[in-house]
Image: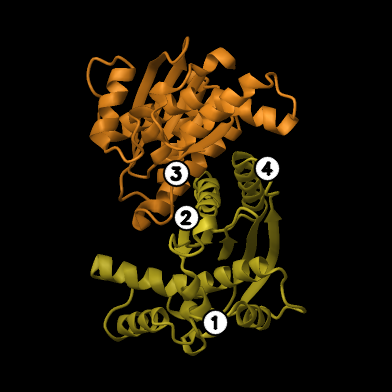
Chain colours: A orange, B yellow
Amino acid sequence: MRVMGFDPGLTRCGMALVETGKGRHVVALDVDVVRTPSDERLEHRLKSIFEAACEWMDVHQPDILAIERVFAQNQRSTAMGTAQAAGVVALAASYRSIPVDFRTPSEVKAAITGNGRADKKQVTTMVTRILGLQKPPQPADAADALALAVCHAWRAPAESLTSAHSEAGQGPLSGYEAKVAAALSQRAAAGESAVRQRPSNKIR
Amino acid sequence: MRVMGFDPGLTRCGMALVETGKGRHVVALDVDVVRTPSDERLEHRLKSIFEAACEWMDVHQPDILAIERVFAQNQRSTAMGTAQAAGVVALAASYRSIPVDFRTPSEVKAAITGNGRADKKQVTTMVTRILGLQKPPQPADAADALALAVCHAWRAPAESLTSAHSEAGQGPLSGYEAKVAAALSQRAAAGESAVRQRPSNKIR
C-alpha cells in the first residue's frame, strides 16, 4: 500500500509518500515541501498547492491520502488558510478516487514516538530512525508529512478490520482474533506506544 | 459589474449573483443553495461544491467573487469544513482569473442593515427590500449570499479608489474628492448605515 501524507499550510505544505512492507516495515519513497509566497493572492496560492498535489498524485499514484486534521482553536490566525489548503488537496484526491483520511497531530505523535505530546524534534528523530534515513528530513513540515504517512500505514489496516467487523456483524475474523484487533485499535487510540502493537498486516 | 456572493458551508452553500446599476441600484440575477449529504465522504462533498461553483461561474461569468470570511473561534465544529468549502470555491475562481475578496459577516450586516450585529431576519428583510424581491429569499444561506454580493457591489468601488490613491500617491482624484472617498470608506468600515453613503460608482 502506498500512503501519501499531507501536512497542510498556506506558506509551507509537506508531502510524503511511503510504501508499506512486511509487518511494520515502511519505506520512504519521496518527500517534498511546497511553498507559496505570502504576498500572493489567496486563490493563487491555493491553485499552486492544488496543482502540486495533482502532480504528486499523478506521479506517485498513492492508494490513500492522509491529511493532518486542523483544529480551529489552535493557531487561530493560520487555521483557516491551513483548512483551505487541506480542502483543495482533498479535492485533488477526490478527482482521482483516492480516499482521504484525517489524522490528528496527537494521534500521529503517539503512533510515531509513543507520546501524543512529543515535540517536533522527537518526531523528526523517530521518523529518521523508523524509515532508516541517512539524515533527518528538513524542514519540520517534511518530517510531519512522513510521520503522518507512517502513522496511517501502521494504523489503517487494524482500523479497517475492526470497522468492517463491527459494521457487518460478521467480519473476516471472529471471536478471539476480532477481540485482539479491537483491543489493539483501542490501545492505539488511547495513545499508547504503537511499538507494542502486533504487526497489523498479519491479521489484515 | 457582476458580483458573485458565496456563503460557504459543507451542508449548505449559498450562491448569488447581482449586477450593479446606476448609483446604489443593484439587481439580483440568480440565487441558489447547494447542499451536500452529511453522510458522504468529505472529499466528495468538496467536489460537489467545487463543481457547482465552476458551473455557476461558467454560466454567469462574474467579474468578482465575494466569500464570507470564516472565523476559527466561531462555530468550532463546523469552521474547518466551512473553510475547506471556501477554499475549493476560491480555487474555482482562480482557474477563471476571477479575483476573490473576503468579507466578514459583521461588515456585510453593517452595509445591508446599518447594524453590524443584525440578526438573520433583519438581513433577509433588508435584502428583500434592496433588491425589490417579491418574497424573502429562503433559506437564510441564500439571503446571506445575496447580502454578501450587495455589500461587495456597494463597497468595492470606493475601496479600490482609496487603495489606488494611497498606494500610488496620486490617484485619479486628489484633494477634497479623495478625502470624501476616504471618509466614506472609513464610515462604512465603522459599521454606520450604508444608506447615507454617497453613490460610490459616481466617483469610481
Bin the neighbour count of mark 2 within 10 Å (Cα to Cα): few under 14, some 14-19, many 20 and up: some
Label 2 to label 3, Cα distance in Å?
18 Å
Q: Is residue A104 shown left or right of residue B52? A: left
Residue behind mark 1: B118
Q: Using the numbered discs, state the Cα–Cα distance from disc 3 to disc 1 in whole angstroms.
A: 32 Å
Q: Residue A160 in the image: x percent, y percent?
A: 61, 27
**If the image is split into quadrants, where does the C terminus of chain B sit?**
bottom left
Instruction: Give how far apart the Cα atoms at labels 2 and 1 are.
Output: 28 Å
Q: For mark 3, what is the residue?
A: A85
Picture quadrant where residue B22 is located: bottom right
Q: Looking at the picture, which amino acid does disc 1 mark?
A: Ala
Percent position (x, y) of residue B142? 67, 67
> Three-letter amino acid code at disc 4?
Glu
Q: Is residue A109 above or below residue A20?
A: below
Q: Which residue is mark 2?
A: B99
Q: Which residue is mark 4?
A: B40
Residue drawn at point x = 62 percent, y = 47 percent: B54
Q: Amino acid at mark 3?
A: Ala
Which circle, 2 or 1, is nearer the viewer? 1
Q: Are marks 2 and 4 on the same chain?
A: yes
Which of the two residues, A14 or A198, is positioned nearer the viewer here? A198
Q: Residue at x 71, y 72 (%)?
A: B137
Circles 3 and 4, Cβ within 8 Å, touching? The answer is no
